[in-house]
Amino acid sequence: DAGITQSPRHKVTETGTPVTLRCHQTENHRYMYWYRQDPGHGLRLIHYSYGVKDTDKGEVSDGYSVSRSKTEDFLLTLESATSSQTSVYFCAISETWTSGEQETQYFGPGTRLLVL
Amino acid sequence: KNQVEQSPQSLIILEGKNCTLQCNYTVSPFSNLRWYKQDTGRGPVSLTIMTFSENTKSNGRYTATLDADTKQSSLHITASQLSDSASYICVVRAAGNNRKLIWGLGTSLAVNP
């Protein structure tokens, strides 16, 4: 999984509790992404980062926030988890945003989150 | 509306056989198309990337084709192996200011002995 780790790998939590997922990379790539994957949907982008402290919203950002204080770490926070946020969350990294092989996104192993 | 549709939804083949997966897209303007392989319980892994001017690209036993005129792509797997059992996802990158990725739902392939 290309020098990308996610923690925790599995989590069960209750509705209304805050949850933070961590993505750590050792590739020194500039871009980092958080996706969710659900049955019946393609991967959906939650938030992405194009540098330390530089983040932007994806297509399904409501209810999520992110932070990137170091190149290697990208945190995803569910401020108050809801059952609709039960999903598999993937972190990805890429060297660039432009066309070509450098924009290849490399994915972490995923975090399975269950919100009861 | 930008969409990526894949067919079939699922496929079962015997080890050693060939198969072809289809991807139709309506993304415009078009930048590139990528095929990913996703093993169960793991993140997607890129197989090939194709731009507008490329018709065919191979990666070992995987060969992707692109017809930009009809907005269709295919992924051909030759001499399938048990390890090819996975979901294969087609992803199209839009061009221009909004360089959004549009993900297909994937084709689930099972290779049986």
Image: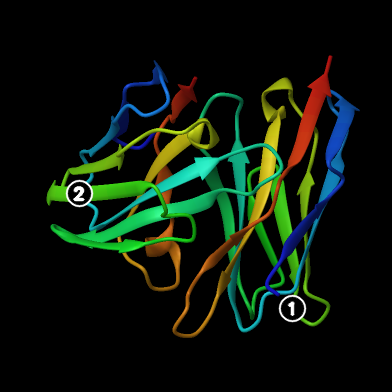
User: Residue type at mark 1?
Assistant: Ala
Residue B68 is tagged as: 1
Measuring 70% from the left and 47% from the top, which residue is drawn there?
Answer: B105
The chain containing the residue under callout 2 comes to: A
**Residue A65: x and y, percent?**
29, 49
Numbered disc 2: secondary structure: strand
Q: Is residue A34 left or right of residue A30?
A: right
Q: Is residue B51 left or right of residue B26?
A: left
**Residue A62: x and y, percent?**
42, 53
Measuring 80% from the left and 33% from the top, which residue is drawn there?
Answer: B79
Above or below residue A41? Residue B33 is below
Please tell me if label 2 and label 1 are on a single chain. Answer: no
The part of the image, by quadrant, that contains residue B24 is: bottom right
Residue at the extreme front: A16
Residue at the extreme left: A69
**Residue at image mark 2:** A67
**Residue B102: x and y, percent?**
60, 62
The part of the image, by quadrant, that contains residue B93 is: bottom right
The part of the image, by quadrant, that contains residue A16 is: top left
Numbered disc 1: secondary structure: loop
**Residue A4: x and y, percent?**
31, 35
Measuring 49% from the left and 22% from the top, which residue is drawn there?
Answer: A114
